[in-house]
Amino acid sequence: MRKFVALAIVFILASTFGAFDVLAQEAETSASGFQAIKQYFIQGGWTFMSLVLICLILGLAFCIERIITLNIATVNTDKLLGGIEEHLASGDVSGAMELAKSTPGPTASIMYEGLRSSSSGPEAVEKAIVSYGSVQMGLLEKGLVWISLFIAIAPMLGFMGTVLGMIEAFDRIEAVGDLSPSVVAGGIKIALLTTVFGLIVAIILQIFYNYIVSKIDGIVNKMEDASIALVDVMARNKVFK
């Protein structure tokens, strides 16, 4: 994953805006591309660059936490259903509940709630599954709102730095009374760099966000399929009285 992020950053720096061409050339001639990026980061001004960096760090922290949690929540539903059906076939409802309870993940939790309501009939099982499924959906999507916030804030901070850099350039023109490139180059450079790094942070976090959303969609689909299959298994093994 770290290699993928590094390659993505290099691609973005090499292909977006004319300023990236200059950055790519300097990165090739320097001893390390990381040092070149670090140098441009410092030149962009510590005020807004620090805020953009904070957005990246916090956003990645939430992304990593979600990815780890979702990977843990992913279980083999077919294997779990097979184990539950074996217990139900022998009339061991409590054993099936114990198997679902000991299995990590939202799918197993929903099955446990359904099995716990088996004595009240199929309607009660479906109601328990739907109600607890909503709770599990909220837990799966926990933290996504913060990732979305950092995706939105990072380029905004970059654009704000751009505006301030342009204001600084015009202030220099007004003070000097000359429109020579050397007068305005500093402010314009800061403006471009803040925009570049703000967009880089937003793009990186957006990639992680889309991966997390697709992971959640996959888990939700498995939850729905497993819930339907659980009711069928319970009916087939005459759990409902």
Image (spheres, grey):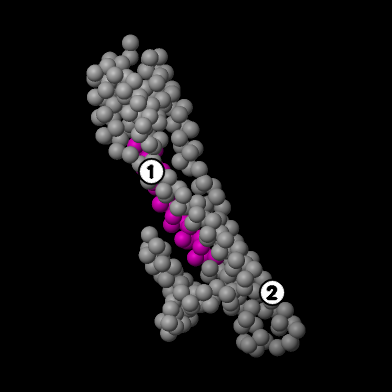
Residue in view at x 45 percent, y 41 percent: 140
Element at label 2: helix
Q: CA distance from mark 1 to mark 2?
A: 50 Å
Residue that mark 1 sits on = 72
Give the quarter of the figure containing the C terminus. top left
Q: Amino acid at mark 1?
A: Ile
Q: Is residue 218 magenta?
A: yes
* Mark closest to the chain's N terminus, 1 or 2: 1
Q: Which residues are magenta?
A: 198-224
Q: Is residue 62 magenta?
A: no
**Left or right: residue 31 compared with residue 175:** left
Residue 47: in sight, yes or no?
yes
Q: Please provide percent x and percent y for residue 6.
A: 41, 67
State whether the magenta stretch is mostly helix, strand or loop: helix
**Left or right: residue 235 compared with residue 9:** left
Residue that mark 2 sits on = 167
Dot 2 crowding, Cα within 10 Å, few <14, some 14–19, many 20+: some
**Left or right: residue 102 compared with residue 66:** left
Residue 224: in sight, yes or no?
no
Q: As displayed, is residue 102 above or below residue 159?
A: above
Q: As displayed, is residue 88 above or below residue 166?
A: above
Q: Are marks 1 and 2 in contact (CB under 8 Å)?
A: no
